[in-house]
Image (cartoon, rainbow, N blue to C red):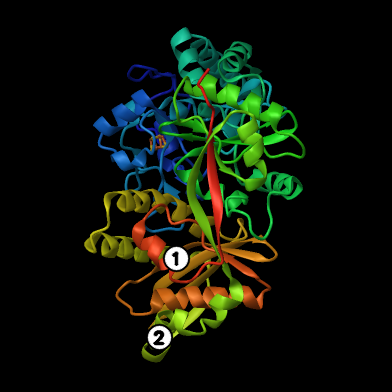
């Protein structure tokens, strides 16, 4: 990740941290590998520490690029004339970095890379074979460069910088050639973050999480929509998700601007006593006494166990669960207004419904922008506006990775213009969850029709229940969800340790 506009090998850049560069600028300017990414949540997006964010902001990068001012991977922007995504600091017209002199350590290191070994117990320094220059470079020269970088990584300020930001250490990649084991860094990271391997939660981890959820018994037709990996994974562009095995349980952690929390209890068969105790110990270590330490989406089966362990339980917004055939039929007086709107839409609009294709992404993006403007013009409350802004990166992840995430997506076009889209997933073979819906608000009945269409599709494929998730505490959303007559509000509880000690 180094769109190099600096001049030569070995040139040092400005403090606080400056590493020598191996790849000459003429090579970087001709290359189309760095700073561009296929997916919005690419694990290789550059990570900026707090200082580096401050410098990037001073260099003109927009604040919205950084979901967490204390340190975060950058939020990528869509490539204006292509299918991929760009670092917001990258100037596509000149193929250069707009903040080259202040670019983060993560970018300065490239094409060297810090990563874990395969068992995840040693930090390694390697070089990335994706860099075309390195494939031509003489091994002796690479090793000499690596030796210089390793000497710098041993300096206390740089060592502390990496330890404070473990996301600078990537997961094992087979196409990175290992140059050295970094024992001092490994020990320092273990001292700060614990010895159990902490892994970034990526697409590759979804089958593992699916398997443990299936074994847990918590996922069933009437459980919370949160008992699905995709529910969490979609926020990967915004938050950092991590996982580790503790006492045989799969523990998912989310790193938010406020601190770390568990979006789900430890997932495993049997008692959670030991794994929960271990996970809470880590949260205390990472968050200190902050009240952000908590476990979200506690299933009803575990409520008494959390109480026994002394946790304080707080109700959260429940999920709305509907009988699928009710929503398919929209029969009777209680659905009269929705039925009328659907009929009006069918009568008035020459529309077509089709399965979402990744080529619809640009049109979805344009619709989301229009829809957000429509919502704001209607006087959206500030919390709703914040949720909308946060959701943009999740929509990008979904448009880009719908197929890999096994999401069901539909789009509605009127006169060939994409004017609505929806995505959902099967929680179990009996329950379909509606993850998101966006419909042009100027077209009467479109939103109702889209939801009806989704429910009819789900019933045709065997759904007994439709879960539309929670209402985020927004009164308007609550009213529209209630108007469809849920059969159950699935309780949702967050658990807080009784005391911070
Ligand atoms: S900060 Fe600069 S060097 Fe790093 S990825 Fe972005 S554009 Fe490239």
**Distance from label 2 to label 1 (Cα)?**
17 Å
Q: Position of 140 compared to 168: left or right?
A: right
Q: In the image, what residue occupies the spot 76% across and 40% down? A: 269
Where residue 14 appears, x then y in whole percent?
32, 19
Q: In the image, what residue occupies the spot 50% across and 29% down? A: 293
Q: Is residue 253 above or below residue 277?
A: below
Q: Position of 255 compared to 447: left or right?
A: right
Where residue 6 appears, x then y in whole percent?
35, 28
* Closest to the observer, 53 or 22: 53
Element at badge 2? helix
Where residue 483 appears, x then y in whole percent?
43, 71
Cβ atoms under marks 2 and 1 closer than 8 Å: no
Q: Which residue is mark 1?
A: 481
The circle on residue 340 is 2
Where residue 150 appears, x then y in whole percent?
54, 14
Ligand 1 rendered quadrant: top left
Q: Label 2 neighbourhood size at 10 Å, few (<14), some (14-19), many (20+)?
A: some
Q: In the image, what residue occupies the spot 39% across and 19% down? A: 11
């Amino acid at each position: 990740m180094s769109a190099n506009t600096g001049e030569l090998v070995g040139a040092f850049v400005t403090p606080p941290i400056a590493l020598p560069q191996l790849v000459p600028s003429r090579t970087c300017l001709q290359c189309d590998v760095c700073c561009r990414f296929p997916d919005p949540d690419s694990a290789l997006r550059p990570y900026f520490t707090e200082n580096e964010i401050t410098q990037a902001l001073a260099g003109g990068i927009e604040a919205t690029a950084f979901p967490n001012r204390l340190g975060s991977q950058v939020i990528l922007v869509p490539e204006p004339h292509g299918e991929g995504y760009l670092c917001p600091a990258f100037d596509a017209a000149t193929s250069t970095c707009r903040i080259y002199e202040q670019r983060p350590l993560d970018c300065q290191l490239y094409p060297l890379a810090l990563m874990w070994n395969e068992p995840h117990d040693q930090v390694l320094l390697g070089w990335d074979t994706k860099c075309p220059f390195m494939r031509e470079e003489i091994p002796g020269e690479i090793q000499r460069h690596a030796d210089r970088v390793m000497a710098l990584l041993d300096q206390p300020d740089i060592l502390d910088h990496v330890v404070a930001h473990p996301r600078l250490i990537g997961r094992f990649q087979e196409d990175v050639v290992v140059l050295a084991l970094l024992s001092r860094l490994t020990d320092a990271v273990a001292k700060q973050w614990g010895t159990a391997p902490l892994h970034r939660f990526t697409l590759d981890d979804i089958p593992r999480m699916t398997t443990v959820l299936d074994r847990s018994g918590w996922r069933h037709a009437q459980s919370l929509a949160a008992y699905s990996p995709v529910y969490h994974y979609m926020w990967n562009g915004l938050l950092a998700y991590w996982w580790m095995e503790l006492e045989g349980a799969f523990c998912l952690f989310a790193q938010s601007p406020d601190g770390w929390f568990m979006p789900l209890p430890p997932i495993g068969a049997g008692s959670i006593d030991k794994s929960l105790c271990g996970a809470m110990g880590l949260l205390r270590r990472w968050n200190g006494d902050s009240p952000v330490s908590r476990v979200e989406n506690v299933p009803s089966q575990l409520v008494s166990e959390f109480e026994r362990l002394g946790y304080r339980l707080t109700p959260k917004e429940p999920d709305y669960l509907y009988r699928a055939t009710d929503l398919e039929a929209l029969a009777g007086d209680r659905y009269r207004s929705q039925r009328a709107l659907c009929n009006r839409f069918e009568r008035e609009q020459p529309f077509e419904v089709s399965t979402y294709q990744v080529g619809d992404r640009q049109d979805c993006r344009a619709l989301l922008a229009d829809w957000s403007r429509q919502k704001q013009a209607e006087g959206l409350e500030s919390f709703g506006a914040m949720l909308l802004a946060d959701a943009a990166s999740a929509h990008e992840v979904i448009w880009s990775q719908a197929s890999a995430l096994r999401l069901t997506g539909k789009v509605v076009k009127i006169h060939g213009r994409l004017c609505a889209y929806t995505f959902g997933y099967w929680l179990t073979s009996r329950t379909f969850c509606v993850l998101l819906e966006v419909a042009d608000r100027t077209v009467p009945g479109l939103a109702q029709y889209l939801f009806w269409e989704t429910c009819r599709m789900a019933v045709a494929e065997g759904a007994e229940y439709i879960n539309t998730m929670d209402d985020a505490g927004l009164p308007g959303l609550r009213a529209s969800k209630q108007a469809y007559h849920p059969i159950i509000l699935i309780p949702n509880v967050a658990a807080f340790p009784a005391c911070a000690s």
